[in-house]
Image (spheres, rainbow, N blue to C red):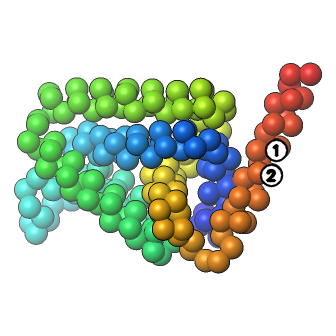
């Protein structure tokens, strides 16, 4: 069950994102990274052909990755995960129409500019405000997979106090503090 251990995933990701400014930067830039990645994946080969999809919607790698993300989010938490899954599919839907309209020659330029801008913002958030390397250096797959869900979950917690079950935030906070203390102790040992 470690794959769908919500507390574990949030403690890992939260240990790298405790500074409020860095969290805000991620809230601004993570979903555009996902959207523009889906925009670029629109131009991958079609995996399946079904006539019930409108022409710009293709069952390609963009759809496959979107489905994987959506299923993973829904398996983590039914309410917030279902919202994240819905948003992920809405991004796929919108990116498909935009990619179809723009064409590859313009789309990849927009994707490149957006990715550079968003990733630069996140690295600044980590370097200047968090003062810790991003999670992707320690667990690339989990960092990419969890980032959109994590920032949505953070937004739900901040705006409406969402918890998947009572005591969730307190348990995750304790795990985050323990992981951050372990990291700081390790960092201190390297310096001495």
Q: CA distance from mark 2 to mark 1?
A: 5 Å
- Depth check: give the residue in front, 177 or 47: 177
Residue 20, above or below 65? above
Q: Residue 91's x, y, as percent? A: 27, 53
The reply to whether discs 2 and 1 touch (Cβ–Cβ < 8 Å) is yes
| Label 2 neighbour load within 10 Å: few <14, some 14-19, many 20+ | some
Which image quadrant is residue 117 in? top left
Name the residue rendered at 81%, 36% in the picture: 184
Residue 6 appears anywhere in the view: yes
| Residue 144, visible in the rendered structure | no
Secondary element at image label 1: helix
* Residue that numbered label 2 is attached to: 178
Point out which mark residue 53 bears: none
Counting from the top left corner in percent of width and height, residue 62 is at 29, 50
Q: Residue 124 appears at what percent x and percent y?
A: 52, 27
Q: Viewed as shown, does residue 96 lie left or right of 187?
A: left
Residue at 27% x, 32% y: name it.
Answer: 111
Quadrant (top left/top right/bottom left/bottom right) for the C terminus: top right
Vertical order, 73 against 99 (above or below): below
Residue at point 89%, 29% (across, down): 189
Number of other residues with Cα within 10 Å of mark 1, as a class: few under 14, some 14 to 19, many 20 or more: few
- Apparent side of residue 174 relative to residue 192 in the rendered image (left or right): left
- Viewport quadrant of the N terminus: bottom right
> Based on the displayed image, in which of its 4 quarters is residue 119 positioned?
top left
Picture coordinates of residue 147 (x, y %)?
49, 49
Secondary structure of the residue carrying numbered label 2 = helix
Rendered image: mark on residue 181? 1
Q: Does 13 sit left or right of 59 as displayed?
A: right
Q: Is residue 68 left or right of residue 41?
A: right
Q: Residue at x 67, y 55 (%)?
A: 11
Q: Nearer the viewer, residue 58 or 174?
A: 174
């Amino acid at each position: 069950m470690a794959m769908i251990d919500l507390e574990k995933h949030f403690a890992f990701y939260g240990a790298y994102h405790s500074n409020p400014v860095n969290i805000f930067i991620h809230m601004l830039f993570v979903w555009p990274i996902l959207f523009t990645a889906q925009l670029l994946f629109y131009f991958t080969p079609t995996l399946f052909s079904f006539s019930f999809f409108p022409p710009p919607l293709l069952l390609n790698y963009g759809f496959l990755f979107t489905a994987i993300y959506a299923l993973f989010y829904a398996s983590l938490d039914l309410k917030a995960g279902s919202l994240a899954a819905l948003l992920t599919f809405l991004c796929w839907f919108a990116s498909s129409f935009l990619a179809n309209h723009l064409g590859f020659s313009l789309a990849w330029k927009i994707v490149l500019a957006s990715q550079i801008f968003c990733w630069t913002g996140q690295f600044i958030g980590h370097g200047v405000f968090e003062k810790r390397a991003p999670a992707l250096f320690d667990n690339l797959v989990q960092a990419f997979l969890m980032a959109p869900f994590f920032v949505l979950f953070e937004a739900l917690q901040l705006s409406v106090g969402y918890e998947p079950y009572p005591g969730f935030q307190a348990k995750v906070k304790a795990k985050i503090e323990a992981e951050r203390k372990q990291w700081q102790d390790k960092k201190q040992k390297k310096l001495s």
